[in-house]
Amino acid sequence: MSENKVNGLLETTIEKIKGMADVNTVIGDQITTPDGTTIIPISRVNYGFAAGGSDLPSKTPGLFGGGSGAAVTITPIAFLAVSNGNVRLIQVEPFTSSIDRAIQSAPDVVDKITGFISGLKDKKNEEVEKTSESEGDING
């Protein structure tokens, strides 16, 4: 009987934590400034929880004592700023872990991919123009 009560405590605690720390907490809602710059906050979320319970010796059967608790810490670590097609990472605190370094390099990766795709499009357009000019010389 008490096992179900402890499980109930754990389930309630976990559901409350899910409500406090979801993906929208880590990557915040975007903010658009009057000049068109979009700012996206990025936070580090740490959380912990504990729960426990016990049957209490008593003349009344089923007497149960238990409790649970949780803590959540949300720390802003950076902001992504998107302006005129450029992405910049504005760091709030020094990056120390490999995940932090990966987040730091994300804007550069996005810029490189965008540049590569633009280069491919430009090259394709040049080839189409050259082909059109060649056909015009043959027909003309």
Image (cartoon, rainbow, N blue to C red):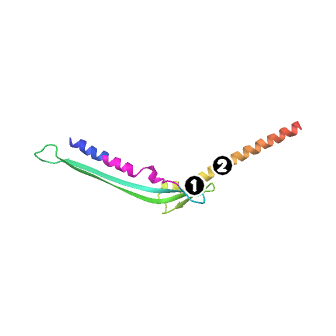
Q: Furthest-top residue in view?
A: 139
Residue pointed to by mark 1: 107
Distance from disc 1 to disc 2, alpha carbons, whole Å, reads 14 Å
Locate the C terminus and report the quarter of the image it occupies.
top right
Label 2 element class = helix
Circle 2: residue type: Phe
Where residue 68 sits in the image (x, y, percent)?
28, 51
Which residue does the image show at 27% across and 50% down from the upper left? 51
Q: Earlier in the sequence, mark 1 or mark 2?
A: 1
x and y percentages locating residue 134 in the rendered image: 84, 40
Query: Where is residue 86 drawn, in percent x and y?
Result: 62, 56
**Residue plotted at (41% across, 58% down):** 74
Where disc 1 sits, the SS reads: helix
Range of magenta residues:
12-30
Relative to residue 117, is residue 88 drawn left or right? left
Looking at numbered disc 1 in the image, what kind of residue is underneath it?
Answer: Pro
Question: Is the residue 135 above or below the residue 92 in the image?
Answer: above
Asked whether the beta carbons under mark 1 and mark 2 sit within 8 Å of each other, the answer is no
Crowd tier of the residue under label 2, counting other residues whose Cα lies within 10 Å: few below 14, some 14–19, many 20 or above: few
Q: Is residue 117 left or right of residue 38?
A: right
Q: Crowding at label 1, few (<14), some or many (≥20) Cα neighbours within 10 Å?
A: some
Residue at position x 16%, y 43% from top?
Answer: 62
Q: Is 8 included in the stretch rendered in magenta?
A: no
Q: Is residue 49 above or below residue 133?
A: below
Mark number displayed over residue 116: 2
Location of residue 94 in the rendering, given as x and y in whole percent from the top left corner: 49, 63
* Numbered mark located on residue 27 in the image: none
Most distant residue in the bottom direction: 93
Q: Is residue 20 left or right of residue 1?
A: right
